[in-house]
Amino acid sequence: MEIVIVADYEKVSMLAAQIISEELKKRPNLVLGLATGETPLGTYRELTRLHREEGLDFSGVTTFNLDEYVGFSLDHPSSYNYFMWDTLFNHINVNPSRVNIPKGDASHLDTYCSQYEEKIKQSGGIDIQLLGIGSDGHIAFNEPGSSLASRTRVTALDRQTIADNSRFFSKEEDVPRFAITMGVGTILEAKRILLIASGKKKAGVCAQFIEGPITSQITATALQLHPAVTVVLDVEASSKLKRQDFYRWAMKAREEQFGR
Ligand code: PGA
């Protein structure tokens, strides 16, 4: 894994948007995997700015989101569908017919999940997948104990996740108990993975997933098996890493040798 440590949340967001925009410039028909939550907000703001001010063109892009709450319709204000349109898609020139977000109110959920997988395959696979990390080490909604070979499916949310996500709802009881999520196995098939994390509250879990043993109890540790992962952290989120000196040294060496 390439570990990049930057000063703060703003820098995490700028760098993540820059990495995505470089991929998009190389490949106008990019298949882009997207995430929800608080962490990607700055990245989406910067991608919007790049579109508005520098003409970054999303017209050929296909997107796939990681997850959605079960039972929520597309226009539910706490749905991830609503979140994505509100924070990104309404502000860029993405083609709505190429936007894919799991449908939380699909009538046959298991069939729907297999079709979602199939659609990813038919698109040629995800070129770059943006990820956040949950405080319990989840990627997408792959909670502790999820198989590291899991595929897109319906899963129960961990109590920790329900408590963490209650800040997006008026009360904790309103947070759904189930979600559709891409599996760990699905995520590992993306050609490149970009995980972003910020703040002290993520420091412990970042140290565990980057430097700890691979375990289904912290599903982000599966990323250690992927050949092309970039992790962008701010100083606070990196504060419990044991090999910080090495990551900083390697960053400096890369900059001197390759310009980044
Ligand atoms: P957050 O969520 O960005 O709101 O911290 C991350 C996640 O649960 O994946």
Image (spheres, rainbow, N blue to C red):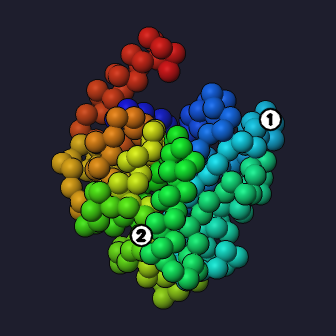
- Of the image marks 1 and 2, the number of the one nearer the N terminus: 1
Q: Quadrant of residue 251?
A: top left
Regarding residue 98, the answer to whether it shows in the image is: yes
Question: SS at mark 1?
Answer: loop
Q: Is residue 72 left or right of residue 143?
A: right
Say which amino acid is labelled 1.
Answer: Gly
Q: Is residue 103 above or below residue 43?
A: below
Residue 99 located left or right of residue 162? right
Which mark identifies residue 35?
Answer: none
Image position of 80 with respect to 119: above or below: below
According to the image, label 1 marks what residue?
55
Position of residue 145 measured from the top left corner of the image (x, y, whole percent):
25, 67
The three-letter code of the residue at mark 2 reads Arg
Q: Position of residue 39 (x, y in %)?
A: 53, 54
User: Residue sitting at 53 percent across and 86 percent down?
Assistant: 174
Mark 1, residues whose alpha carbon is within 10 Å: few (<14), some, or many (≥20)?
few
**What number is the disc on residue 153?**
2
Q: For mark 2, give the secondary structure.
A: strand
Quarter in which the N terminus is drawn: top left
- Quick one: which residue is furthest to the bottom in this view? 173
Residue at point 52%, 15% (across, down): 259
